[in-house]
Image (tube, rainbow, N blue to C red):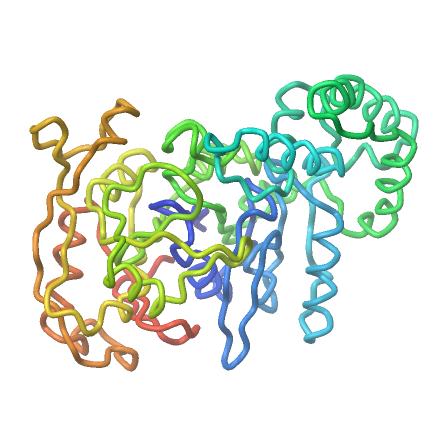
Amino acid sequence: MPALVLLGAQWGDEGKGKATDLLGGSVDYVVRYQGGNNAGHTVVVGDQKYALHLLPSGILSPGCTPVIGNGVVVDPSVLFSELSGLNERGVDTSKLLISGNAHIITPYNVTVDKVTERFLGKRKIGTTGRGIGPTYADKINRVGIRVQDLYDESILTQKVEAALDVKNQMLTKFYNRRAIAVDQVVEELLGYADKLAPYVADTVLVLNQALDDDKVVLFEGGQGTLLDIDHGTYPFVTSSNPTAGGACTGAGVGPTRISRVIGILKAYTTRVGAGPFPTELFDEDGEALRRIGGERGVTTGRDRRCGWFDAVIARYATRVNGLTDFFLTKLDVLTGWEQIPVCVAYEIDGKRVEELPYSQSDFHHAKPVYEMLPGWSEDISKAKTFSDLPKNAQAYVKALEEMSGAPISAIGVGPGRDETIEINSFL
């Protein structure tokens, strides 16, 4: 049975939660393999809307086991707040599994994130201030705190001391902040140990055994391709690998296990935070996309920057991830425009460029080259098949598919779980 990777093909916020939830009833495990509570997903089930930040979207699907993999960074306070909120709404969260190798976002990681971002001023990256980057930095520097460390007080204390040796010097002497007490951090972290214990597991073993037993496993990325630490618009990126390769390292499965890679594309383009964005709109069209699409970050609460669809980025995502399919979301938002511009290439220093520039400087100066496609005015939210869509909407989808380099196998025509046109099955 297949192992599928589902990820964002733009700058995140493409609607991965809806896509994951749509598949959730057909899969046995849904795995978050990177990121932390900086990756918000909105899932609408009936008249209920759920905002998930750290938990896998599959937690809303009965019979599905949600997994937080070793590549995720976990803020325990956020985790238990989210679990409590779901339990209060009648959602069973007891099947959740958390890798003992996942790293913990400590209070000092959050402090460092906020003070360093503030210090950067105009050069700030646009982080969420939730300690994600500093936690990954600690992981790479080998001074990180893992979930399993909470069960050995001596090791935990030694690791916190090692991390704070340097951080307290920086906080007090460079940022003029108060030093953080080791004992206070250790006490807070130990307070989560018993509550976490029922969920902690060797998730690498669990997932590989599940695949051996012909179970269907869905690997869910946070953020998007253009926010990947290696393949995104560096330095305006996240601190991990939401691209398809991250599923292997972040969950502990080999690449030969992956049978399908699904990219989520919004019918236009958005991003949150700083960084280059060639098709960004600063006019009434941009404001209309923001308003109609409800473009406000689930986790950050920040308005998303909005622009027209960028086929150059879509082709890049296809190449970097080895995409086999696209799930096109929010097509309904474009209803009402007489003509819809689509970016088919860039102009850089007077030259037409059809692939994503390798140079960061070139990408910063890229100007979109648009092709105008006819729009539609009909309500498409009730469409159940591709043929139900207006002819111009069908033509728009086909054009995006041809430009992007992979088949569009599903189309979102509204926020609801059932407001999806399935062209080809993902399973």
Q: Quadrant of residue 71?
A: top right
Q: Position of residue 233 (x, y in %)?
A: 36, 32
Q: Position of residue 359 (x, y in %)?
A: 27, 22
Q: Residue at x 62, y 50 (%)?
A: 67
Q: Position of residue 189 (x, y in %)?
A: 84, 40
**The one of 379 and 116 positioned closer to us in this rendering:** 116
Q: Quadrant of residue 368?
A: top left
User: From the viewer's perspective, is residue 220 above or below residue 243?
Assistant: below
User: From the viewer's perspective, is residue 211 above or below residue 333?
Assistant: above
Which quarter of the rendering shows the C terminus?
A: bottom left
Q: Residue at x 7, y 28 (%)?
A: 351
**The one of 287 and 248 positioned closer to us in this rendering:** 287
Left or right: where does residue 181 sit relative to residue 39?
A: right
User: From the viewer's perspective, is residue 179 above or below residue 330?
Assistant: above
**The one of 51 and 383 positioned closer to us in this rendering:** 51
Q: Position of residue 387 (x, y in %)?
A: 16, 75
Q: Quadrant of residue 400?
A: bottom left
Q: Residue at x 81, y 32 (%)?
A: 149
User: From the viewer's perspective, is residue 64 above or below residue 78?
Assistant: below
Q: Residue at x 42, y 74 (%)?
A: 416
Q: How many marks?
A: 0
